[in-house]
Image (cartoon, rainbow, N blue to C red):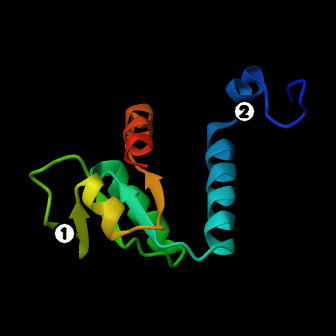
Amino acid sequence: MNSSGIQPSLEELLSADPDQLVGAVQKRVRLKLEQHNYSLVLFGAGQLGRRALESLQRIGKQPVAFADNSAALKGTTLHGIPILLPEDARTQCAGSLWIIAVYTNAPVKKQLDALG
């Protein structure tokens, strides 16, 4: 652990078993989702978004929408779930918990922060 005793050091993360790290993150996310009855929006309707959807469905969670920057996907569905532009999802899914399901999440976080 680092000096604060809360977060692991970079060396600890790099030396850890990746499968154990993924499992630990999945467990924390699952517990958070089970503790709260959020409606969910998945940001990203690509490969990672599909994988996130499958994982959520395995624990009984069904997102209310996908948000995606692709105007070509606007108004379509993925496995019966509507795909909306982020600004539309913000208004139509107010109060939802957003899960970023894209590989480069820093630009998405900046975009979502700008949306409010």
Q: Residue at x 64, y 73 (%)?
A: 36
Q: Position of residue 83 (x, y in %)?
A: 23, 63
The relative height of residue 95 versus residue 70 in the rendered view (above or below) is below
Q: Position of residue 113 (x, y in %)?
A: 45, 42
Marks 2 and 1: which is nearer the front? 1
Q: Position of residue 16 (x, y in %)?
A: 72, 32
Side (left or right) of 15 relative to 84: right
Residue linked to disc 2: 16
In-front residue for pair 28/17: 28
Numbered circles on residues, count: 2
In-front residue for pair 60/71: 71
Q: Residue at x 30, y 50 (%)?
A: 47
Residue linked to disc 1: 77
Q: Amino acid at mark 2?
A: Ala
Side (left or right) of 84 relative to 113: left
In-front residue for pair 106/56: 106
Label 2 to label 1: alpha-carbon separation: 38 Å
Q: Residue at x 71, y 29 (%)?
A: 13
Disc number for residue 35? none
Q: Is residue 40 visible?
A: yes
Side (left or right) of 101 relative to 78: right
Q: Amino acid at mark 1?
A: Thr
Q: Residue furthest top?
A: 11
Say what secondary structure mark 2 lies in. loop
Q: Is residue 79 visible?
A: no
Q: Mark 1: few, some, or many residues within 10 Å (few <14, many ≥20)?
A: some
Side (left or right) of 102 relative to 27: left
Say what secondary structure mark 1 lies in. strand
Q: In the picture, which quadrant includes the N terminus? A: top right
Q: Position of residue 2 (x, y in %)?
A: 85, 25
